[in-house]
């Protein structure tokens, strides 16, 4: 079935705050945008401000101080909407969260074709988070039920698919592995000198750029110790950290400890997508450093990787499952072990060899165009609403 055959109503429910400048917002907005571009009449339920997308009606759930109250508010809005739209909306797309189990069950009982998207497994035997046995059990039950009631499931990594199949007995025919994507029109390659000028950066410096949440799954210790080694060799190298988050104080402490204060720039969160594009465009090398015990099993598909690729910038990444394949199979850069010296050597290899860096950047752009556009990802999501197992499997190809 062609993507442009998928007209009609679609209810999309995501426990996401659209006022936050992060990858979950990007994913939600872009998927909703492309559902609408493919002809769906979209009702989007989230928290936060209306993203004002053509063809998308936004329904905001009220904010709440506690997680249970937040989830209850989101479910209330979504359940009312599912009942009201049931005569003209036959599809429901849910960004999976254990708290949205009432939405999943109600959607199926009301006759919707249901697709869920899963980008993490924050529960179960490999999760090192601070969950009580009861909370972990509830989340695991939610994953089990989700696997039963969904017509189709989007897993952003092969590892997540494998966990759903092995631990939660999900039918593998329901699951399509589709990575996070990128807006190819926004993050297009541009001359580095132009990006440096628009970003207000020093033009004769070589910028090593990281973008994203300052979270405990990012190996900032490796990034900063690696850059300290780079700085000893290249007097013109500057590390640009674009983002913010709960690990900000730890990052600042380590910068001070390594005496890198004049060689590291912290921008804070950048909500303006055009400015983010320019900061990535100013890079000579871009970094990815996801690393946590549970990620060794489920892998990762960071949105930042697709954005780096689309911008045509070479990537140095820690060799985490999912990320390693993205970098190595595309020829877009170098994947390294979680070791500062290995990361430093890879960064220096690229910033000291312009032709190698340019070739990797060109390969990155080709990969973005062929595999990682949001248009391509949503196009491959649409068959999951259909009943045919053959159509579901075709989405992964």
Image: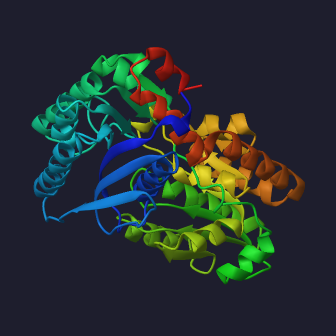
Say which quarter of the image contains residue 199.
bottom right
Q: Where is residue 5 in the image (x, y as percent from the top left)?
A: 51, 35
Q: Can residue 6 be seen in this view?
A: yes
Residue drawn at x 69%, y 58% is 311
Side (left or right) of 317 relative to 28: right
Q: Is residue 150 shown above or below 191? A: above
Residue drawn at x 72%, y 74% is 195
Residue drawn at x 21%, y 42% is 100
The colour scheme applied to this rendered structure is rainbow
Q: Position of residue 19 (x, y in %)?
A: 35, 69
Side (left or right) of 19 relative to 302: left
Q: Is residue 55 shown above or below 132? A: below
Quadrant location of the C terminus in the rendered image: top right
The residue closer to the viewer here, 352 or 102, is: 102
The residue closer to the viewer here, 257 or 72, is: 72
Q: How many labels does the image show?
A: 0
Q: Is residue 231 visible?
A: no
Q: Position of residue 128 (x, y in %)?
A: 29, 40
The residue closer to the viewer here, 245 or 38, is: 38
Q: Residue furthest front?
A: 87
Side (left or right) of 288 relative to 7: right
The residue closer to the viewer here, 251 or 308, is: 308
Q: Where is residue 37 in the image (x, y as percent from the top left)?
A: 52, 51
Q: Is residue 288 shown above or below 214? A: above
Say which quarter of the image contains residue 237.
bottom right
Q: Residue furthest right?
A: 355
Side (left or right) of 326 relative to 380: right
């Amino acid at each position: 079935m062609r993507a442009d055959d998928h007209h009609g109503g679609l209810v999309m429910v995501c426990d996401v705050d659209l006022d936050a400048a992060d990858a979950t917002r990007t994913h939600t907005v872009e998927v909703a945008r492309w559902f609408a571009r493919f002809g769906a009449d979209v009702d989007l339920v989230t928290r936060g401000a209306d993203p004002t997308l053509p063809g998308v009606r936004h329904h905001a759930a009220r904010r709440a101080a506690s997680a249970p109250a937040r989830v209850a508010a989101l479910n209330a809005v979504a359940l009312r909407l599912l009942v009201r739209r049931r005569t003209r909306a036959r599809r429901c797309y849910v960004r999976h969260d254990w708290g949205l189990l009432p939405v999943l069950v109600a959607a199926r009982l009301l006759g919707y074709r249901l697709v869920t998207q899963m980008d993490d497994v924050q529960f179960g035997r490999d999760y090192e988070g601070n969950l009580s046995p009861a909370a972990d059990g509830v989340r695991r039950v939610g994953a089990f039920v989700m696997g039963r009631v969904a017509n189709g499931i989007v897993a952003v990594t092969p590892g997540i698919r494998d966990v759903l199949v092995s631990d939660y007995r999900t039918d593998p025919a329901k699951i399509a592995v589709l990575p996070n994507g990128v807006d190819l029109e926004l993050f297009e390659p541009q001359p580095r000198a132009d990006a440096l000028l628009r970003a207000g950066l020093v033009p004769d410096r070589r910028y090593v750029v990281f973008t994203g949440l300052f979270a405990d799954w990012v190996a900032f210790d490796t990034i900063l110790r690696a850059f300290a080694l780079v700085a000893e060799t290249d007097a013109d190298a500057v590390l640009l950290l674009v983002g913010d988050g709960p690990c900000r104080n730890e990052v600042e402490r380590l910068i001070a400890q390594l005496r890198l204060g004049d060689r590291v720039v912290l921008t804070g969160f950048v909500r303006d997508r055009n400015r983010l594009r320019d900061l990535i465009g100013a890079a000579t090398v871009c970094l990815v450093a996801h690393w946590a015990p549970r990620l060794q099993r489920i892998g990762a598909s960071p949105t930042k990787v697709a954005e780096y690729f689309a911008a045509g910038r070479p990537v140095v990444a820690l060799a985490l499952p999912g990320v390693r394949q993205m970098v190595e199979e595309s020829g877009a850069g170098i994947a390294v072990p979680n070791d500062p010296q290995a990361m430093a050597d890879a960064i220096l290899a690229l910033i000291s060899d312009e032709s190698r860096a340019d070739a990797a950047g060109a390969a990155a752009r080709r990969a973005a165009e062929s595999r990682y556009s949001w248009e391509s990802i949503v196009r491959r999501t649409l068959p999951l609403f259909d009943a045919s197992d053959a159509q579901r499997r075709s989405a992964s190809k």
